[in-house]
Amino acid sequence: MKINEVEAAVGVTKKNIRFYEEEGLISPRREPGNGYRSYSEADVERLRRIKLLRKLDVPLAEIRQMLEGECTLAEGMTRQLERLHTRRTDLDEAVNFCTLLQKEPVSLNELDVEQTLARLTAKEEQGVSFVNIEQTDRKAERVRGALVGAGLFTALMLFIMGIMVWASCVDPEEAPPLPLGSRSEERRCWWIVSKRSEREKKMLIVTINEVPGKKIEALGVVRGSTVQSRNLGHDIMAGFRTLVGGEVTDYAEMLTEARQIATGRMAKNAEELGADAVVGMRYASASVMQGAPEVIAYGTAVRFV
């Protein structure tokens, strides 16, 4: 018989059947070739006996002993009756205490809890068992907290693994943008870069301290600076790019653009002084805040004489 047929015949679920198999209470035959379980009539009868005893709350260990002939049905039922009588006694005592509290002419806040607990303790010393909150409540809380923590940790690890796989397969430039700034800000930066290019056609900028073939007159120090920051999407992708290696093109292009803007502003500053060139030009950078570097271009504005 297949497991679906056994499920219908016995009236237990597939999970129950597999659980009993894991506990060693049944051992169905495996079909050669595909390895599927094949249940015999004997397996079905054995499951019916297990179901009967479990309905009476007989522990699995004792069911195994009775099935294997290690103890008789009468011996097993005798032990189970003892357990049930003990539980009935405990329940009767709990019912008695609940009845007494029901008849108390006071509220819970007015109840003499210390005296009532002392009476419970005296009964426990006589062999009566009430709920052991030191085990049940702590255990339930611990299991619930562990399950929540495991679920959150699993979700976090799956998210990180997914991003790492994505980062290894997708270039950050091809990732969908998540802009934090406005389009007007992008147009403003492009305008500055475009204007810088026009000015540089008129303004000679060199890193040496002289212009070959020209006599110069120093006009003063000129500078230009900008603070750049990438949007959140590029920051995330660039961060995960460091895990898999390779050039972080987003940051490289950000710094290139920042140098262009700073150079353009320095050139504008030199134009305002009436300069023909900037000599001794240098770049410097500093971190204003995390993920937002400041790039400075500076030099000496000079005029040809």
Image (tube, helix red, strand yellow):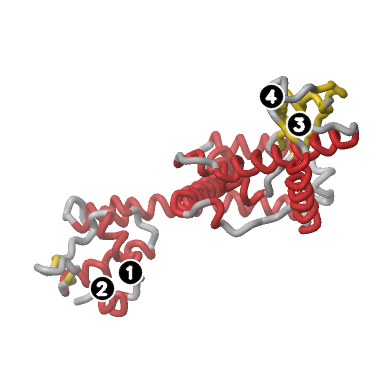
- Mark seen at residue 14: 1
Residue position marked by numbered label 3 in the rendering: 288
Q: Residues within 10 Å of mark 3 (few under 14, many from 20)?
A: few
Q: Is residue 71 left or right of residue 100?
A: left
Label 2–label 3 contact, CB within 8 A:
no
Which residue is found at the position 48% from the left and 48% from the top? 164
Compare marks 3 and 4 and give the one earlier in the sequence: 4
Q: For the residues marked 3 and 4, what is the alpha-carbon distance in whole angstroms?
A: 37 Å
The mark found on residue 3 in the picture is: 2
Residue lying furthest left: 32
Q: Residues within 10 Å of mark 2 (few under 14, many from 20)?
A: some
Callout 2 secondary element: helix
Type of amino acid at the residue the image marks with label 4: Pro
Is residue 231 found left or right of 172 in the rendered image? right
N-terminal of the pair, mark 1 or mark 3, is 1
- The quadrant in which residue 26 appears is bottom left
Residue 212 tag number:
4
Disc number lying in front (2 or 3): 3
Q: Is residue 254 left or right of residue 50?
A: right
